[in-house]
Amino acid sequence: MKWLVAILVLLWSQVAIAKPDLTFAARSGRVTVFAEAELHDTAKELAETAEATLTRIAGDLVGLPAPKEIEVRLVRDSSDLPSIAPGGRGAPEWAIGVAYPDLGIITVATRRGMKWIDPAPTLRHELAHIALGAALRHAPHWLHEGFAYQHSREWSWERAETLAGMAWFGSTIPLDQLDASFPAQEQIAHRAYAQSYDFVGFLSRRGRWEDKEDDGDRWPFRRFLGAIAAGADPDLAARQAFGRPLKQLFDEWRVDLDQRYMLMPMGLFGLAIWIFCALLLTAAYFRRRHQNKRRLAQWDVEEAARHAKAVNVPPYVPWPGEDPFDDDLDDEKPPGPRLMN
């Protein structure tokens, strides 16, 4: 038994040694950042932008409670996130950042394995979680994730591929099952995250009525959040803000998703044809240019030949016998004139 206790103590000490050493790095407004020593410069940059991010997020949460103090814990590797999480809370293995809205704590990593990941979008995403958690005590998971994505300003090609696949194969997750589709495994939850991001984005730009001329004013979306904060369930809040039950809004979003991504193959096909035609035109241009060069060179040869014929000099032929123009003949003086009586 003593040996077992000793082994457990040894293992715990190894874990404690491996835990990153976080020290105070920066503070700006309501945000305080603790980071590993080599990340203090990065921590200062993040702190400088955090308050502005919170102000921008607050534009969607007008009149609702706001977070008072936020603590950010910055580490280099994502594998260290569980060790710096609040006691007993942990972190998903695949996470690069985690927010704990009830505690006002955010953990962020700058890389996953050998891949460096910009911590700025991650922090914006997690700050949105903190802000929404302070404003809405009981928000569905899909709303949390979609709202955070709206304010992180990050785009992912993989997410676009996921949405395209959901549109092509009709594999969207029913709204009443969406909250239960966020397991700990990243690949399984990927569809749920992508769908939440896109659906909430649709709500944020839809406007009050289903009007093609609507300019995408966000006030209905803000009213929707305010109604949930006041205690309304999401369906009632949707009726009050958008004039439609949440199920109908979800169906509208699926139609919008199909229109955006079902047309993508045709657009890509048209783009491929355009590129092919452009390549043909380019090849024809260079071929014509090469032919013109050859034609000009041939014209130069022909012109040189014509010029040579115009100034043709006969070959030299020596004079037979004595040369009448020999200089020796010029030396003899002609006879003098005869005198005539």
Image: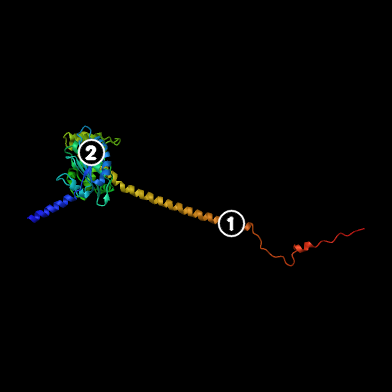
Gap between marks 2 and 1 measured at Cα:
84 Å
| SS label for mark 2 | strand
Q: Name the one closer to the observer, 219 or 241.
A: 219
Q: Residue furthest left?
A: 1
Circle nearer the viewer, 2 or 1:
2
| SS label for mark 1 | helix
* Left or right of residue 259, residue 309 in this image: right
Q: Whole-percent x and y of residue 127?
A: 23, 40
Q: Whole-percent x and y of residue 232?
A: 16, 35
Amino acid type at mark 1 = Ala
Q: Name the one closer to the observer, 341 or 60.
A: 341
The quadrant of the picture occupied by the N terminus is bottom left
- Name which residue lies at 33% across and 49% down: 268
The answer to the question of whether label 2 and label 1 lie on touching residues, with beta carbons closer than 8 A, is no
The quadrant holding residue 248 is top left
Q: Whole-percent x and y of residue 195?
A: 23, 44
| Residue to which mark 1 is pinned | 304
